[in-house]
Amino acid sequence: MSLWLQILVYAVGIGLVIAVLIALMRTKRPIRAFVGSGAQGVCALAAVNVVGAFTGVSLGLNAFTGLCCAVLGIPGVISLLVLKLLMNY
């Protein structure tokens, strides 16, 4: 992967994390929102893997994908799917 593509991927990832943190801080209960978002992300990752048996699109479960889905929630799952599409893995 080229250097510019790596910089772009990291910039988008950092932007997503900042956007999620800003959205969490605007709620009245940020811890509850963070836990709820993480649960939704993990459930979305599981749903992608279950549906992957039919569509052929799945995400492997490892420390990076689990952390990304737990912290970012559903936008994390979508960004992982887009990265997989861009990098042809």
Image (tube, rainbow, N blue to C red):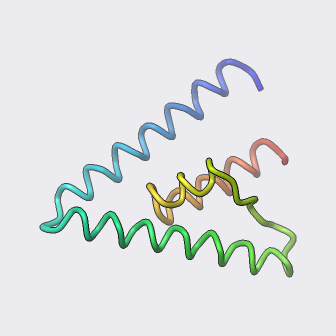
Q: Is residue 4 above or below residue 59?
A: above
The residue that appears at 76% across and 80% down in the rendered structure is 51
Q: Name the residue at the top extreme.
A: 3
Q: Is residue 84 above or below residue 10?
A: below
What x and y, as percent, mark residue 66?
59, 57
The residue that appears at 35% across and 53% down in the rendered structure is 20
Report the number of discs. 0
The residue that appears at 54% across and 52% down in the rendered structure is 68
Q: Name the residue at the left extreme.
A: 28
What x and y, as percent, mark residue 56?
87, 70
Q: Is residue 10 above or below residue 24?
A: above
What x and y, as percent, mark residue 5?
67, 27
Residue 9, located in which quarter of the rendered image?
A: top right
Q: Is residue 71 left or right of residue 42?
A: left
Q: Quadrant of the N terminus?
A: top right
The residue that appears at 45% across and 72% down in the rendered structure is 39
Q: Is residue 21 left or right of residue 82?
A: left
Nearer to me, 54 or 62:
62
What x and y, as percent, mark residue 6?
64, 27
Q: Is residue 33 left or right of residue 63?
A: left
